[in-house]
Image (cartoon, coloured by chain):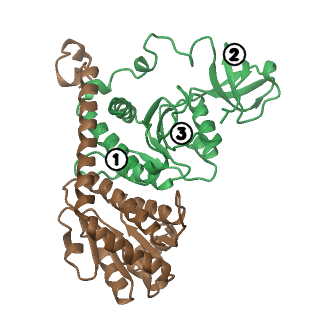
Chain colours: A green, B brown
Amino acid sequence: LPEDLASASMTLARRFSSKATLWCWSPRWPQHAEHVAVEFVHPVIVGKRALPAVAVSDADPITALRTLVEAGDVLLVVATAMTTEVAAVLQRAPAWGIETIWLGSGPRPRFGLADHLLWFDDLGDEAAGNGTFVLAYHVLWELTHVCFEHPGLLAQPIADEECPDGHCLTCSDEGRVAEVVGLNGPFTLVRSAGETEEVDTTLVEPVAPGDLVLVHAGVALSRLDAEQV
Amino acid sequence: MTEDTDFLYPFIEGGEQDAAGLLADLATSAAAKGATSAHLQAVTLADRDAAMTTLAQAIAERFNAGGRLFVFGNGGSATDAAGIVALFRTPPWGRALRARSLVADHAVLTALGNDVGFELVFSRQLIAYAREGDMALGLSTSGNSTNLLNAFAEARRRGLLTLGLAGSDGGQMAASSDVEHCLVVSSSSVHRIQETQTAMAFELWSRVQSLV
């Protein structure tokens, strides 16, 4: 966990340096999302910079985040269980072009669903009430500000870390995750890595706005099913 | 820092390259902060053990007699207040108890803040909501928040049980006769104080559950 906190902090500092916003969402404990946001917006230590962090508490978080997030942003999710809703939000992250951090406890979710896991394996839901999560995001904030004291490191390309061998699942020939936006004549408009593009969805018809597909070379090859919970 | 010639001088701050070194330092720092927090929590819980037993009994008595719990704080403490309310009202186990956060309603909070002043946002709500036999729990890391002190004074006038979670040296909350039970976390770090306050509230809730 200390290493995971270090890595997530570096990511946050780099993203903030590139004008990103941190979106915070906790389906069961909205107060945790709000606490994270207020830490970054109104630092407890005088002189630390105010950073854009926003708690999302909409009843329909997918619709809200789809509208609000911009490519390069970061989403922090605080949740102990992999619900259908949490999975649906995280599955869309590559389509929206955002990086994800998941703070939670209990059985670990499958590898790769979130970019960063801040995980308390030995605790259950009590981690949300006994101060454990509070400690985790306090340290996340503290370390992020340490990173700002190293501007040279923050300027390095972000992609290098995500694809250490220059090849990753989300940008190789296995297809990129894309979210259907709407129809445009014979083509379907999708959002992938935060950019809108036209693709051919003949192979996966019918599609509707909000559906997730895997796209390669301008063609949607398959649908991305909702994560089984 | 970002001039075109920076590549010639990789040793200056702006050209720092050792990400692995920084990540290692950050991880060490994270572990140390975790240990500090755990130690403060253990010491504080042990030190306030008898006080929390007394307090849990007082709270349980009020709940059992139909009393309600109002919780409030500012900023991060406002969200911690909401967390305590969630713990009491939608508990992971045990009995759901009547608890409300005085920071939950944006309309009420902004109306009072705008019209009568932010120092009265909690006391004015207690005037409207509180009944004798209820309880008021306020969280502050300094112990000096004016709107909390005003709320405690109003709560006492109305016969509420008044409980404070403070930090540092307890500030004015620890010195005030309006705060019947004030649990102070002796630390100078706002973050470490909040973590232990949340742990104490969890422990209190847990003890109250065995008495209701």
Residue A9 x %, y %: 35, 34
Residue projecting furthest to the front: B210
Left/right placement of residue B191 relative to residue A219 reads left
- Give the residue pinned by disc 3: A69
Q: Chain of mark 2?
A: A
* Disc 1 versus disc 2: nearer the observer: 1
Q: Which mark is residue A218?
A: 2
| Amino acid type at image mark 2 | Gly
| Amino acid type at image mark 3 | Val
* Disc 1 versus disc 3: nearer the observer: 1
Q: Secondary structure at mark 1?
A: helix
Q: Tags 3 and 2 in contact by the CB under 8 Å rule?
A: no
- Give the residue pinned by disc 1: A135
**Do dots 1 and 3 share one subunit?**
yes
Q: Is residue B75 visible?
A: no
Q: Secondary structure at mark 2?
A: loop
Looking at the rendered image, the quarter that the N terminus of chain B falls into is top left
